Image: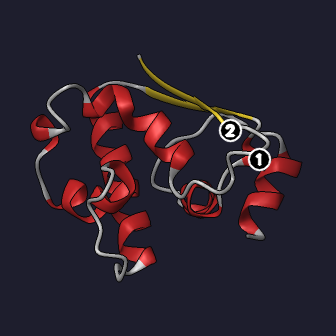
Amino acid sequence: MTVLAARAAEFGGGYAWGVVRHLFEPEMGADGGRRLAGDAVALAAPALRHGAGSGDEDPFSVVHGLYWLTAGIAQRAPLLLAVDDLHWADQPSLRFASHLARRQALPRLPTDQRIKRDLVSL
């Protein structure tokens, strides 16, 4: 099983994609994710790499790329994503979590319905 974990901090909300970067750091590795080549990584690059974006990326494309990156990792082995203190996460990371929570294609463990409802309302 692959476990990707991150922790949001009360004052970390000002760092765009901070929680997402923390989650995917183990997958990106020292090679900067070169082994994860493909369209999903290209779309997700602004969220995963410091200075990768030009600032005019379509936010949906980035979130969609993160979704397909997550799905690709989950195809290799069962995947558990764990974020502690998600309510303190930055807005772009919350958008990704919300997008992921709404998708039915990935099997999920039961979640706290209050948290799921909060994510979908973002």
Label 2 and label 1: CA atoms lie apart by 6 Å
Crowd rating for badge 1 (residues with CA inside 10 Å; few <14, some 14–19, many 20+)? some
Q: Residue furthest top?
A: 1
Instruction: Please report the residue visible at 27 percent of the width from the left and 57 percent of the height from the top.
Output: 45
Residue under pointer 2:
8
- Total tally of numbered discs in the picture: 2
Instruction: Please report the residue visible at 39 percent of the width from the left and 36 percent of the height from the top.
Output: 24
The reply to whether callout 2 and callout 1 are in contact (CB within 8 Å) is: yes
Instruction: Please report the residue visible at 53 percent of the width from the left and 60 percent of the height from the top.
Output: 103
Amino acid marked by disc 2: Ala
Give percent across and percent down for residue 21: 44, 42
Give percent across and percent down for residue 49: 30, 50
Residue under pointer 1:
88
Give percent across and percent down for residue 17: 50, 54
Image vertical order of residue 110 relative to residue 113, above or below: above
Q: Nearer the viewer, residue 13 or 108?
A: 13
Give percent across and percent down for residue 87: 79, 48
Q: Secondary structure at mark 2?
A: loop
Amino acid marked by disc 1: Trp
Q: Earlier in the sequence, mark 2 or mark 1?
A: 2
Image vertical order of residue 100 relative to residue 60, above or below: above
